[in-house]
Image: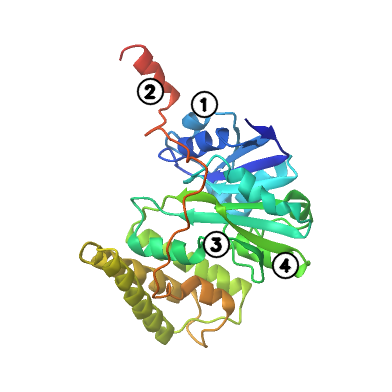
Amino acid sequence: MTRSVRCSVVIRAFNEEAHIGRLLSGILQQTIRPIDVILVDSGSTDATLAIASRFPVRVLSIRPEEFSFGRSLNLGCAQATGEFIVTASAHVYPVYPDWLEQLLEPFADPQVGLVYGRQRGDATTRYSEHQILAKWFPAESLRRQSHPFCNNANAAIRRALWLQRPYNEDLPALEDLEWAAWALGQGYALSYGAEAEVVHVHDESRRAVFDRYRREAMALKRIHPQEHFRLPDFIRLFVSNVVSDGWHALHDGALSRRLWEILWFRWAQFWGTYRGFALSGALTGQLKQAFYYPRPLARVSEPSRRPVMPIEYRESYPTPREESSSADGN
């Protein structure tokens, strides 16, 4: 059974034909049915829009030369009609049919302004990325969070707050963190919901990893200009994270298969961070502790299985043209 609630879902997408069908299918199987689903496309040239056309989705377009993460989100939020706005990357998909229900539940507290949910990887996710996700998105929920770390690949906000303060369109990344810091400054709370779980598919090349962390470091420097990242910080954090990843990989029986991947991923991550920051000053700050420090050398057992059956997805979501060809016997 589904029930209506005044929430909108805003999805940013660019060439996501491999993933968009799974996300939209997962939204349709939720215990809460959003009143609108808005896909903001920034110039896809693959089958993203053709696949999306098979679902009850409103498509908005933004030209690639006008794109920023914040501008794309603002375009979607401006068209949303729900009391709450759920934001999702096009390459995530919900694990359970109560994903939206769990993500929106903390808003029963009128002081909660933002909720973000758990993310984990899949079989294509790099080993070091698995460690990052495990550290950033633990198995235990946190009702009140004192710092602005969050991630709008799987998050929800109050639309009334967005109307007061849209996302910063000039930042190259971390527009979610900057908005969360504003909300905290207004006296609102942030909440983390481990039960609002999605799979976040990242299968990036070395160059893509480097670019992602350089972009985020540039944004973090603009948000917190007092922060710096020097060459000794690069060396120390590269080594400590490789050691941590190697320790976990050894206990997972994956060290021999994953060692080279761990080395290049952490090099790309921290070299990108180094290039994105100014090259002087000391490494300080609670947010950089959250972003860059390695996962502790301790094995954390997963909680017992939830009493909710996960969603069963199809292997692929063909375009209308493919479905028509199949029906014609071609």
Up-down relation of residue 45 to residue 173 (above or below) = above
- The C terminus - image quarter: top left
For the residues bearing labels 1 and 2, Cβ distance under 8 angstroms: no
The tag earlier along the polypeptide, 1 or 2, is 1
Q: Which mark sits nearer the N-terminus, 3 or 4?
A: 3
Mark 3 to mark 1: distance in Å? 36 Å
Q: Which residue is mark 2?
A: 322
Give the secondary structure at mark 4. Answer: helix
Q: Nearer the viewer, residue 12 or 23?
A: 23
| Amino acid type of the residue that numbered disc 4 sits on in the rendered structure | Leu
Crowd around label 1: few <14 · some 14–19 · many ≥20 (10 Å): some
| Percent position of residue 164, x then y | 79, 56
Amino acid type at image mark 3:
Glu
Element assignment for label 3: loop
How far apart are the alpha carbons under marks 2 and 3?
Answer: 43 Å
Residue 244 lies in quadrant: bottom left
Give the label on residue 184, or none: 4
Task: Single out the residue that lies furthest toward the left.
Answer: 256
* Amino acid identity at mark 2: Glu
Q: Position of residue 91 (x, y in %)?
A: 47, 46
| Residue appearing at x 57%, y 63% in the figure | 174
* Amino acid tagged 1: Arg
- Residue highlighted by disc 3: 140
Q: Position of residue 227 (x, y in %)?
A: 57, 81
Q: Position of residue 261 (x, y in %)?
A: 28, 64
Give the residue drawn at x 72%, y 64%: 189
Q: Which residue sits at x=42%, y=74%?
A: 294
When the figure is inspected, residue 294 is found, relative to residue 182, above or below; the finding is below
